[in-house]
Amino acid sequence: MMMMIQYTYSGFLFLSFATQIQSFRFALVPKTTDNPFFILAHHGCQDAIASVLLRLDGIQNDSNSTCIYGGVSATTTNPNPDPDGALQAAYVQSLLLEETGQPPLDGIAISVKNPDLMRPLIDEAVHRRKIPVVTFDSDQDTSARIAYIGTDNVFLGETMAKVAQQIRPTGGTFAILWGDDAPNVQQRDQGFRDHMNPDLWTECHGSPVNYNRDLDRALALMEDFAQQNATVIVTTTGGPLFHDDYAAFYKRHTHRNVTIISADDFAVQIDHLSRGYVQGLVGQMPYEMGYKAAQVLYDIKTGNFQGPEFYGTNLITHIQVPLVLPELVVDHNLIGRLRILGYTLMGVIYATALGCGIWTFVRRNTTVIKAAQPSFLLLLTLGVIILGSTIIPLSIEDNGESPMDETSATWVCMSIPWLACCGFTISFSALFSKTIRFHRILEEARGYHRVRVQAVDVLLPFTVLLGMNVLVLLLWTFLDPLMYVRKDNAGLDGWNRIISTYGACRCENHVAYTLPLAGINTGVLVCAIYQAYKSRKIRLEFAESKYVAMCIILLLESLLIGTPILFVVRNSPQAYYLAVVLMLFVICLGVLLLIFVPKMLISAEYSHRSLTDQRRMIMEGIRESVPEMKGQPGSGRTARSLDIPVIEPNPGVQVVAETHEVVGDGYDNAPEHGKQSRPETMYVVIDSQTKD
């Protein structure tokens, strides 16, 4: 639309541009001609015409160039002679009909009072009369006007709201006065309301109200709102402050501590501000509006207009800075009572882990617990307790006012990765180390020899992984330790004071240490996954592949869900603390329940049976879990198809696993129970009171 208009105007340039002298006639149409705001805009338009603005491209402005200023004037008896904008519309119509007896206009700038009446006139000027039209101060954006020059009135309303809340940060009640119902006034009202905090502010009864440029009515309305003990009275136009009795009004209500915020910043308003009769002014730049309007009209007329459609002008705020600023309440984002939840969840972890550990120790000589290898179960509970203890340093913080000493700040923060990494490594290493032990026994026993594998024989992976964690943590602690520091959040109050802080653990290069630790502990998970996969077909009471896999899935789900949340809330201590504590609780309690509850159920089932029955149940269960094993080539038989008797080992021997293979007629490798013509039974001893 704008480009079409631009090209249209290019075709209607005066032919006299070929000469070196050109005169221009622009019209500036205000809402009322005696308003100081529009008088300043007229001065800007005149200065633009008189300046080097019209001495471009070899075109010389002559003395006949002018900025016509006309329209409706208010009187003492009739302060608002044009309440509906009809007189302004009639004046624009007269300009279009050339009833002034002057040469045709080269452009019109209008401050729109009634958008509905002005729209057809603007369209007629642009399309029929080929006269460029721009609006200033108050817009009609649905018309054919080419550009708007002036204040973003929604932003002006928002700025007035900021000033009000800056002066009265605790909130209260507010009232809004309109000078008229022009579009710019309504936009200011919208911006003000949208920016006021609804939790702190409520609107007075009868607000907003339009005083229709009647200053006596405006002052009477302000009197009514003051009687309601309004905290803030806002006038979206500066009219009431021009009343001769305004100072007397304010003095009558000084004891009410009412705050007055007004648009514009003319001399009389500045004088009231200096006397303390108004607390905040948001001024516009009418001179710049008039100057820019003439410049844009000139560019359109000469074919140099390139846009944009909106030329915004700046705002100027004037505010009383009190000797004693309003009390500042800084939000330090302390964990506060959330630590009660953290310590409660940690207590549940401790109680569950200790309960499982005590149960394991008390029943360590039972068949099920011996088969499950109690040393590794106890190691698992220890790791969970250490991991859960991470909640303790996470719950420690300063009071927001006085910082921690350097030593405390370091130990509080560094204990978090120490406890988390060591606890995690111990817990999950215990899970897959016991599985490694069982697999090693089976592999060694393939030669049909009785074998004994001590727990210490398979602690190497556990020791290596834990040692690597400790090495990285030591380097981190001594080279670039984490320290508890308090940072400022973004955002200031109206007096440029910090309003929010947060405490966090920080160091210069944490990535250099967190990445190796993440890699090492990812290795722990990979090993656990691998061992769980290898033992997927072994009876679950012993290798526990199903429950180890469930533990790993639980951990991965917690990390996948929790890590993005932690990243988003990393600068919000309460949310970060809650997310970490819940992740630790889910992981710790999940591991304990998945590993120990099945054993407790099996132990309860076995406790009512004799030792012989328990061994028979274990052997039969293992037969069911052993995959089909090939016999001698061509035999076509498998262990599952054989009726294999159970061979009782020596007294005191704990049978943990039993495998069967068809060996034909060979008996040389049969156990000490004698040579019999039957498939050989190979049993494996993990813990025994007898000697090999």
Image (tube, helix red, strand yellow):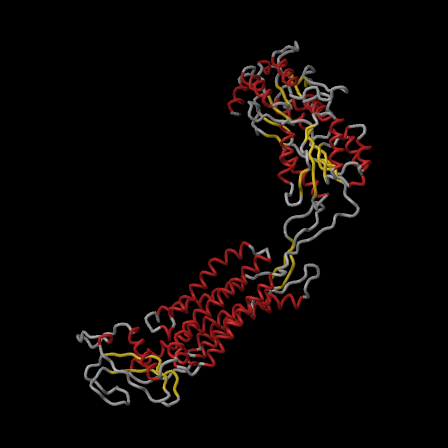
Q: Quadrant of residue 98?
A: top right
State the residue in front, 413 or 201. Answer: 201
Where is residue 71 drawn, in percent x and y?
68, 18
Q: Quadrant of residue 45?
A: top right
Q: On the picture, is 227 further left or further right than 420?
A: right
The quarter of the image holding the C terminus is bottom left
Where is residue 183 drawn, in percent x and y?
62, 28
Q: On the picture, is 295 further left or further right than 648?
A: right
Residue 187 makes an appearance in the image: yes
State the residue in front, 378 or 503. Answer: 378
Q: On the picture, is 371 further left or further right than 283?
A: left
Q: Quadrant of residue 308?
A: top right
Residue 443 makes an appearance in the image: no
What residue is drawn where x is 68% and y is 51%? 498
Vertical side of 400 occupied by 544: above or below:
below
Where is residue 135 drawn, in percent x and y?
62, 24
Q: How many marks?
A: 0
- Which residue in the rendered view is the most extreme toward the left? 634
Vertical side of 110 occupied by 628: above or below:
below
Q: On the picture, is 483 further left or further right than 629?
A: right
State the residue in front, 58 or 691. Answer: 691
